[in-house]
């Protein structure tokens, strides 16, 4: 068994990228299996610069690692080339030697983005990133989408689709009172990016399975985008994304058999956050408390979206929701991020240990948005600490109350916490 998995157990933005970046040291391949450029992971490089990644896997900063964008993803070639250029501007190599894209991944076409903008401009808006993600997955399901392999086999057909798809939406765009587009110019620029992306396209399913079946199998780290509550099947529907964000999506999103999965690590953030709509049982609404939690919004670890820049909603740690996520994902261990933020709650930090749901106390979250809206949190409080823990590297050196907080979460979720983030930088992690 040679595949390890990292997924988010909450609402996204848990800090998965930094743990993938750290664990990439011990893996040969880092692979994205879901989502598109609507997601974002931030990696802090050894020199302190931050690297914002949206589709390229978080192992790209490691010279030895091959990075794969799997068949379960959707690819916007324009945004991908912009991302590659940004990575290269930080003196990091990006070539076929360390990046491959599945020929079965779906192309995000210009009309997908245009359709997303039209929807968001009307009453049916869902607060999306306007990246065309829902639209391309809809095309995929209705079998009208375009796969990456067509970049190589029939680029002229891709060009025609890019142009005619936009032209077909001209009237709808006008009715939505959106600015006119130069469809010909957009299609031309799109094809320039398509041609550049073509060099990375290959049969990654075959490549991965060959690497996993060597006499000395490659170690693969599957990197999940977004998180459990945004899963299309198990999340707080309809406030979800359009792909599978759970560990179950690894096998289909990369084209590997499930028995090759070795360990699933779930990432939990001590100060829970969310971008966009949907129920948030433990959300903090007090403006003064929110200001304390957010702190300096100019820092690397500020609570605003990597992709959208939107300020995140914040809340108290929610154990019933984590228990459900662990149940579905089969997590073996947990990486806890932002323990250094815990004292921002004040002298005592409320932790949600159960819900009151229709007059009944339950210790595991229900599975739908409408049910979550009817839930009220049941809190226990834990004392926080005053010491700065960003320089701590051993668990035993943490303040006593910090140790107790970690042990409390472990005890109430029955899953060990193996890694603890105590700051935004790569080395600010306690390994247990």
Image (tube, helix red, strand yellow):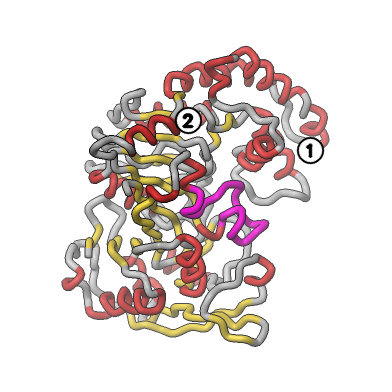
Quote the CA–CA distance across marks 2 and 1.
35 Å
- Left/right placement of residue 149 relative to residue 350 reads right
- Of circles 2 and 1, which is in front? 2
- Left/right placement of residue 278 relative to residue 304 reads right
The location of residue 71, given as percent across then percent down, is 51, 35
- Name the residue: 77% across, 33% down: 173
The number of numbered discs placed on residues in the rendered structure image is: 2
Q: Which residue is mark 2?
A: 102
**Among the 4 quarters of the image, the one containing residue 279:** bottom right
The answer to whether mark 2 and mark 1 are in CB contact below 8 A is no
Q: Is residue 241 one of those drawn in magenta?
A: yes
The location of residue 348, given as percent across then percent down, is 38, 82
Compare residues 248 and 175 and report the one nearer the observer.
Answer: 248
Using the rendered image of the protein, determine whether residue 185 is visible from the camera's viewpoint: no
- Name the residue: 36% across, 70% down: 415
Reading the chain from its start, which is encountered first: label 2 or label 1? 2
Residue 88 circle label? none
- Check the picture and name the quadrant holding the C terminus: bottom left
- Name the residue: 35% across, 40% down: 30
Against 296, is 251 above or below?
above
Q: Which residue is mark 1?
A: 176
What crowding class fits label 2: few (fewer than 14 Cα within 10 Å), some (14-19), or many (20 or more)?
Answer: many
Compare residues 24 and 93 and report the one nearer the observer.
Answer: 24
Q: Does dot 1 land on a helix, a strand or a loop?
A: loop
The location of residue 84, given as percent across then percent down, is 40, 29
Against 3, is 333 above or below?
below
Q: Is residue 430 one of those drawn in magenta?
A: no
The location of residue 27, given as percent across then percent down, is 27, 43
Task: Please report the bounds of the magenta region as a residue range.
Answer: 230-249
């Amino acid at each position: 068994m040679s595949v390890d998995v990292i997924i988010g157990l909450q609402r996204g933005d848990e800090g998965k990228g930094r743990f993938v970046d750290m664990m990439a040291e011990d893996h040969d391949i880092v692979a994205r299996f879901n989502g598109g450029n609507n997601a974002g992971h931030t990696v802090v490089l050894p020199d302190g610069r931050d690297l914002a990644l949206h589709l390229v896997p978080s192992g790209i900063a490691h010279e030895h690692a091959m990075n794969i964008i799997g068949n379960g993803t959707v690819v916007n070639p324009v945004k991908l080339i912009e991302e590659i250029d940004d990575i290269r501007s930080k003196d990091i190599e990006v070539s076929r030697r360390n990046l491959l894209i599945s020929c079965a991944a779906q192309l995000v076409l210009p009309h997908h983005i245009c359709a997303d903008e039209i929807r968001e401009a009307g009453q049916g808006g869902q607060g999306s990133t306007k990246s065309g993600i829902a639209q391309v997955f809809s095309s995929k399901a209705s079998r009208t989408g375009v796969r990456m392999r067509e970049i190589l086999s029939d680029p002229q057909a891709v060009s025609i689709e890019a142009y005619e798809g936009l032209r077909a939406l001209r009237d709808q765009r006008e009715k939505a009172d959106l600015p006119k587009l130069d469809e010909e110019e957009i299609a031309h620029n799109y094809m320039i990016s398509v041609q550049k992306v073509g060099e990375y396209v290959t049969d990654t399913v075959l490549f991965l399975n060959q690497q996993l079946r060597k006499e000395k199998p490659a170690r693969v780290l599957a990197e999940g985008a977004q998180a459990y509550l945004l899963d299309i099947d198990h999340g707080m529907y309809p406030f979800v994304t359009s792909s599978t964000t759970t560990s179950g999506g690894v096998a289909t999103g990369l084209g590997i058999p499930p028995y090759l999965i070795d360990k699933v690590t779930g990432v939990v953030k001590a100060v829970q956050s969310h971008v966009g709509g949907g129920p948030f049982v433990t959300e903090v609404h007090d403006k003064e408390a929110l200001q304390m939690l957010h702190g300096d919004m100019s820092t690397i670890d500020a609570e605003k979206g990597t992709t959208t820049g939107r300020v995140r909603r914040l809340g108290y740690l929610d154990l019933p929701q984590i228990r459900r996520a662990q149940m579905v994902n089969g997590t073996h261990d947990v990486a806890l991020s932002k323990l250094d933020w815990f004292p921002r709650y004040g002298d005592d930090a409320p932790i949600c240990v159960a819900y009151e749901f229709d007059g009944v106390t339950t210790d595991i979250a229900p599975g739908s948005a409408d049910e979550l809206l009817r839930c009220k949190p049941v809190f226990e409080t834990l004392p926080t600490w005053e010491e700065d823990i960003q320089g701590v590297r051993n668990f035993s050196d943490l303040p006593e109350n910090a140790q107790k907080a970690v042990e409390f979460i472990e005890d109430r979720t029955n899953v060990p916490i193996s890694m603890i983030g105590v700051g935004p930088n790569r080395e600010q992690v306690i390994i247990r």
